[in-house]
Amino acid sequence: MQLKGKRVLITGGTRGIGRCMVQELIDGGVTHIAIIARDKKGLKEISEANPEVKFLRIAGDVANIDILREAAARIEDKWGYLDILINNAGIVSAGPLEELPDEEIYDQVAVNLTAILLLTKYCVPLLKSSEDGTILNISSGLGLIGMPFYSVYGSTKAAIKQFSDSMRRELAPFNVSVTCSFPTATATDMMQKFEGREMDSPQLVAKKSIEAMLKKELQVIFGGDERIKDNEMNFMDPKKFDAKVVETYEQFKASSEGHKAL
Ligand SMILES: NC(=O)c1ccc[n+]([C@@H]2O[C@H](COP(=O)([O-])OP(=O)(O)OC[C@H]3O[C@@H](n4cnc5c(N)ncnc54)[C@H](OP(=O)(O)O)[C@@H]3O)[C@@H](O)[C@H]2O)c1
């Protein structure tokens, strides 16, 4: 699959990994990009910095069903079809479950999960009208391994993995592929309040995720061999992984304290 000439919808394309994916798309020859994000200024800036690209700027919250419907309706009206849907926007609020504010539990589910289910639903007819449709979902390493203090965030991200598998199988007869990306800690605004730990660059995560999508790979997992081994241990011998978590419990708790990006 080639990027040139493709019509793309991306959520959260104004900052972090999403912003870097937009750059990858532009560098690859995409000239029609729809972006959903809340900050109007960020949308305006990206559009002014790339005058050669025709942007559909959809300013609003993905947790608002009307914004999602508006996005699909505007794409149908302007383009008539969609080649690439990138479900990227996400938020996080870490902490012991009993201390998480109820609103932040609801919001993480609404933004990280419900919005993706609904936006994909509205885009499926448009993707089926493409000659070569594809969906890229941004999950997280925390969607593969359930870690303490990320019970809600991790649950939404695990659901994205399951959703990706289901939709890949459901859409296979319609030539619509689905790729799921599992970044580990990446240096973006989302991680400003996370203490310590080496991080991937958002440019690397964006590049590798787009490459995997173009090759129609099922998934791309970041974090190298160590992460692959952890995933295997967590699946094959979860009690052994529990013991590993006990060793770093206090350190991980301190690192995640106050980790919010909403
Ligand atoms: N950074 C990491 O370490 C990491 C690791 C694993 C997975 N991920 C996942 O990667 C994705 C991108 O994360 P990031 O680190 O690039 O985040 P980020 O730097 O915080 O950027 C988030 C982007 O999503 C948009 N957004 C957030 N909430 C939104 C909402 N309710 N409605 C519409 N747009 C919204 C933001 O724009 P506005 O603020 O203007 O709305 C922004 O463009 C997320 O799904 C995240 O869970 C990140």
Image (cartoon, rainbow, N blue to C red):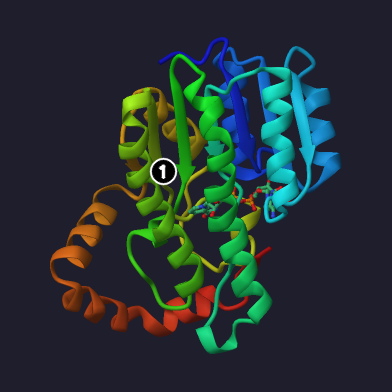
* Residue 233 horizontal/vertical position (percent): 18, 64
The residue under the point 39% across, 60% down is 158
The residue under the point 51% across, 19% down is 129
The residue under the point 36% across, 22% down is 175
The residue under the point 24% across, 61% down is 230
* Residue 25 horizontal/vertical position (percent): 57, 22
Q: Is residue 188 left or right of residue 36?
A: left
Q: Is residue 157 left or right of residue 216?
A: right
The answer to which quarter of the image holds residue 173 is top left
Does the closest atom of ligand 1 sit within 8 Å of the Cβ of label 1?
Answer: yes
Q: Is residue 193 above or below residue 6?
A: below
Quarter of the image where the N terminus is located: top left
* Residue 127 horizontal/vertical position (percent): 51, 26
Q: Nearer the viewer, residue 49 or 192?
A: 49
Which secondary structure lies at badge 1? Answer: strand
Residue tagged by mark 1? 181
**Label 1 is placed on what type of residue?**
Ser
- Is residue 202 visible in the rendered image? The answer is no
- Is residue 10 visible in the rendered image? The answer is yes
* Residue 200 horizontal/vertical position (percent): 47, 47
Quarter of the image where the C terminus is located: bottom right
Q: Is residue 6 above or below residue 15?
A: above
